[in-house]
Amino acid sequence: MPNAISGFSKLSKSEKIEWLLNTYFTDKDKAWTLVKQYWNTDNKLQKLHDEFIENTITNYYLPLGVAPNFSINNRLYTIPMAIEESSVVAAASKAAKFWKDRGGFKAEVISTEKIGQVHFTYNGNFEELNRFFETVKPKLISETQDITKNMQRRGGGILDIQLRNKSNALKNYYQLHATFETLDAMGANFINSCLEQFAKTFKAEAKTALVGDLDIVMCILSNYVPNCLVRAEVSCKVEDLKSKDISNPELFAKKFKQAVNIAEVEPYRAVTHNKGIMNGIDAVILATGNDFRAVEAGVHAYASKDGTYTSLTHCTIDNSIFKFWIEIPLALGTVGGLTSLHPLVKFSLELLENPTAKELMKIVAVAGLAQNFGALKSLTTTGIQEGHMKMHLMNILNQFEATSEEKTKLVEHFKTNTVTHSAVAEAIENIRG
Ligand code: MEV
C-alpha cells in the first residue's frame, strides 16, 4: 500500500506525474509516454485544460460526433454529441432522418424557473419566525442588488423567496426557498451567491429581532427543477410509420406503445429506458459544456416525482395517429461556465447556431426523444444487439489490432453475418491464416 502524500496539489505537474509513476506503475516509461501522448502540443490550449480542475495530469478524450438532419420546429440542426458508446450517434442520426420525413420534431419550453434554498435551524416559535421573515424579506432582496443588477437588466433575477416550515420532518429545520430566472445562464453561481447573501442578511437581522437561536446550515441551489420544463414530440399517421425497417406499421406502433407502457409501470425497465434517453441527452449536454451530473440528478428525481420511478417518455395511438413525447426538466446554460472557455464547446454552440438556453433545452429534449425512439424501435423489432454489435465491431477489431485492410474485409463480411466477439475473433484468425 502506498504512503499518503501531503501537499500533492502544490507539486508541479511533472512532479505529480513523477510521484504517480514511482508509486503505482511498474513500466514507468510506458505510463509516462501515454500521459504525454495526450498532452496538446499547443501549450496555451493545454494550460487552459490544465486549469479547468486541480491536479490535471493529462487529457481524457471522448469522441465528439454529430447527428445531422434534426428537424426541430421546422428548422434543421446538426447536433453535436460527445459520447463513447458506439451506437448512440448512429441511432440519433437514423431517428432524425426518420422523423424529418414525417413532419420533424416539435418542441416547446414550458417553464424556466430555477430553485435555491437556505437551510437553517431555529429553536423558537414559528409564528414569530414567519413575522420576522415577512418583515425582513424586502431587505433580503435589496441586499443582493450588487449581485442581481446585471441579471435584472436583462430581464431575470430573483422571482420569490418563501419561508418553508420543515420542522415536522426534522426538528427545528426551516428553509428560505427561493426561485430565480437566470435566462441564458445555467445560473449556479448567480443563485448560490444570492443565497449566501440572503443567509448573511437573515442571520444578522435575526440577532436583534428574534428571541430563539437561528443558525444557517447551508446555502445551495437545487438541481431538482420541476418548473424548468421542456416538452418534445413527434407524431404521424400510423400508416406513415411504414419504412425500410417497418413493414407492418400497425404492429410496430402497437408494440412500440406497449414498450413505453411497460416502462411507465415497471421501474426495472424504466431505469434502462431512461438510461437510453440520457444517452442522447448527456452527449449533447457534454458537447455544449453543461453539467451532466446536475441534469442526470434532476431528470431522475423528476422521473420519480409521483412516488414511483417511471418512464420519461409517453406514447399514444388515437384515431390512427401515433404520438410519442418526452417532458423533462433541464436547467441549461449557453453563456457562462465552460461555454466561453472550452474551444470545442464554443464550436458545438456555433454548430447549433448559438442557441439561447431555451433553444438548447428543446434541442436536448429532442436528442433524448430521438434516442429513445431508436432504442425502442430496435428493441421491439430486430432486438438491440444487431445494431449495437454492428457499431461495436470497430471496437472489437481495434482490440485485435486489425489493420485497415483487415477492417475493410471484415466490415464487409459482417454486413451479412452476426457480430459476436467470438465470430470476429474467428474471422480475424481465418484472414490471418
Ligand atoms: C443502451 O445504452 C441503452 C438501451 O438499453 C436503452 C433501452 O433499453 O431502452 C438500449
Image (cartoon, rainbow, N blue to C red):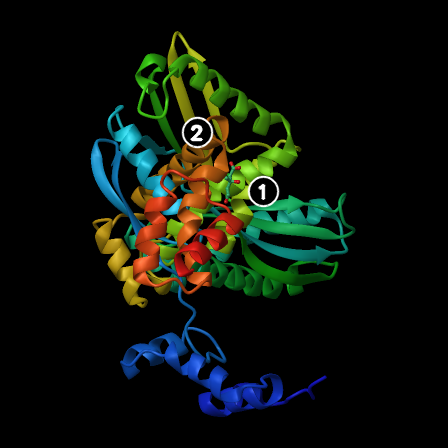
Earlier sequence position, callout 1 versus callout 2: 1
* Residue 432 shows up from this direction: yes
At 49% from the left edge and 52% from the top edge, which residue is drawn?
Answer: 426
**Figure check: 380 above or below 294:** above
Q: Is mark 1 within 8 Å of ligand 1?
A: no
Viewer-nearest residue: 297 or 245:
245
Residue 404 shown left or right of residue 52 in the figure: left
Residue denoted by label 1:
301
Q: Would you identify the image quadrant in which residue 73 lies?
A: top left
Spatial CA span between label 1 and label 2: 26 Å
Q: Which residue is mark 2?
A: 377
Q: Position of residue 2 (x, y in %)?
A: 69, 86
At horizontal 34% and vertical 63% (from top left) the residue drawn is 403
* Residue type, label 2: Lys
Does residue 187 show up? no
Q: Quick one: quadrant of the C terminus?
A: bottom left
Q: Position of residue 76 (x, y in %)?
A: 21, 38
| Element carrying mark 2 | helix
Indicate if the residue with disc 2 has its beta carbon within 8 Å of ligand 1: no
The quarter in which the N terminus is drawn is bottom right
- Report whether 394 appears left or right of 134: left
Residue extending furthest top? 319
Q: Position of residue 428 (x, y in %)?
A: 43, 56
Q: Position of residue 358 (x, y in %)?
A: 33, 43
Residue furthest to the front: 433
Pointers 1 and 2 in contact (C-beta within 8 Å)? no
Circle 1: element type:
helix
Residue under the point 24% across and 26% down: 101
**Counting other residues with Cα less than 10 Å from the Cα at mark 2, is it few (<14), some (14-19), or many (20 or more)?**
many
Q: Is 409 left, or right, of 22 in this rendering?
A: left
Q: Residue drawn at (36%, 18%), measured in percent from left and top?
A: 247
